[in-house]
Image: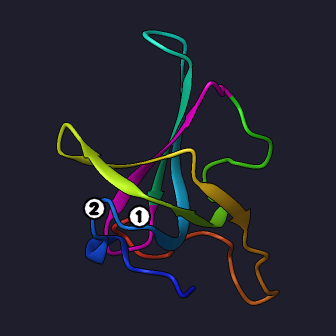
Amino acid sequence: MSATAISAVAVRRPTTLSGWVTGVEAYARPWVRLDIDFCDGTGTITLRFMGRTHIPGIVVGSHMTVEGTPGVEGGTLVMLNPVYAFVVEDGNSTGACEDPRC
């Protein structure tokens, strides 16, 4: 499946996204979760991993693809427990999103 731009995401429709991690925040209350801000240059979505406070390798600047079903929570796009894979950069890339919107 090819990647969809975050700005074109349809809520409650399975989708694949490709982009960069722009923020990582762990919460213990009101429930344990890890929220990842994820940007592709067209928009931002929150990737929420329930029951996790850390995932090895997911740090600001990580390039990833994710698959899941997005929803909206408080006006914010959120994808719960997506399947993810790291994208290996070629030798010509900085490995970070160079779009100023990220």
Q: Which residue is drawn at 43% across and 58% down?
A: 69
Across and down, in percent, residue 13 comes to: 36, 67
Earlier in the chain: of badge 2 and badge 1, it is: 2
Q: Which residue lies furthest to the top in this view?
A: 29
Q: From this view, report whether residue 27 is shown above or below residue 60.
A: above
Q: Residue at x 65, y 25 (%)?
A: 53
Q: Residue at x 53, y 70 (%)?
A: 19
Left/right placement of residue 22 relative to residue 9 reads right
The residue carrying mark 2 is: 11
The residue nearer to you, when weighing 87 against 102, is: 87
The tally of labels here is 2
Crowd tier of the residue under label 2, counting other residues whose Cα lies within 10 Å: few below 14, some 14–19, many 20 or above: some
Q: What stretch is highlighted in magenta?
A: 39-53
Task: Please state which amino acid type lies under the numbered disc 1.
Answer: Cys
Across and down, in percent, residue 71 comes to: 31, 51
Task: Please state which amino acid type lies under the numbered disc 2.
Answer: Val
Q: Is residue 40 magenta?
A: yes
Location of the N terminus (image quadrant): bottom right
- Its colouring scheme is rainbow
Which of pointers 2 and 1 indicates the residue nearer the eye? 2
Across and down, in percent, residue 9 comes to: 31, 71
Left/right placement of residue 65 relative to residue 48 reads right
**Mark linked to residue 102:** 1
Which quadrant of the view contains residue 70? bottom left
Distance (Cα) linking label 2 and label 1: 21 Å
Crowd tier of the residue under label 1, counting other residues whose Cα lies within 10 Å: few below 14, some 14–19, many 20 or above: many
